[in-house]
Amino acid sequence: MHFIPTYPSKVKNLKKQAKRLQREGAGSHVSLLDQVAQSAGYDHWNHVIKCLEETERTQAARGLLAEIEAVILAEQAGEIRIVRTGPEATRSQPFVLFSTGTGDAWLLEPTHDRAICLVWRGERQQAHIRDLPTKLEILWDGTFELRGEFFIVETEHPEIGARAIAGFPLDRLRPYLEASRSVERKFDEIIGQEDTVPLTPDVVAHLTKTGWDAKQLAAAARQGARYSPARDSVLFPPVVEA
């Protein structure tokens, strides 16, 4: 079936035509819906409904592009902005977009933890987002997780790679993500959540600002220790005796 841009007003008018013909005794309501649909260039009435749904999805995708631009502009202005879209924007799942006010902005797909960076350290990124005639195509290049006060990402981005990032407005972001996830998913996160992050230079720098000793953290990192945000503790791997 070919796509015809279709809006609620058009569908309403076609229904009125079918009702008028039914009052005149021209046939059953179902057959008349097909008849008026064909007179308007559609294959049948179901074709009208499919085109209406596709038009609504396309409009939602255009709305997402506008939100992406708004989040990028907010980050460039040093502002925090967090937005959750409706599920129609992706046909099945919602998006969460946020700017941090500290130089970064991200587009997230919460159901499968997919992520793509929009702004990194103040520089707008060339995110692979294609505006096609009937849909928005996003080539995700990473995954994300919130662990304590850290935003954990693993990406194919050459500058970002895999890292734990502190300083994002995670307390404000979490409710948006939770609103986008199923009850089953939330339960799985509570049961199976890992509690630690590696002591990368970024994590060490953040912890040093909160009062930790940089030399002790560096020594712990060399021994394979990890930081637990929930316990605010450095945990060392178990000692295995030969």
Image (tube, rainbow, N blue to C red):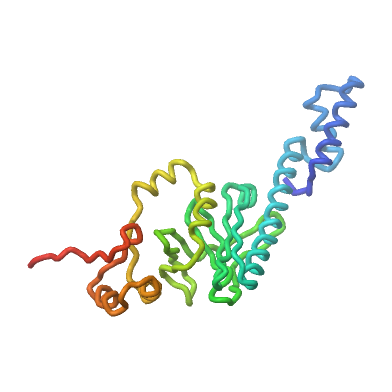
In front: 1, or 184? 184
Q: Is residue 98 left or right of residue 232?
A: right
Q: Position of residue 205 (x, y in %)?
A: 39, 76
Q: How many marks?
A: 0
Q: Percent position (x, y) of residue 239?
A: 14, 65
Say left or right for 177 vs 18. left
Q: Residue at x 67, y 65 (%)?
A: 69
Residue 29 position within the rendered picture, expressed as x and y whole percent measured from the top left: 80, 24
The image shows residue 185 at horizontal and vertical percentages of: 44, 45
Relative to 80, residue 32 above or below: above
Which one is nearer the viewer's eye here, 153 or 218?
218
Q: Quadrant of residue 219?
A: bottom left
Q: Quadrant of residue 24?
A: top right
Dividing the image into 4 quarters, which one contains the C terminus?
bottom left
Q: Is residue 99 left or right of residue 25?
A: left
Asked whether 199 or 32 is in front, the reply is 199
Q: Residue at x 37, y 76 (%)?
A: 201
Residue located 78% across and 48% down the image: 4
Outermost front residue: 211
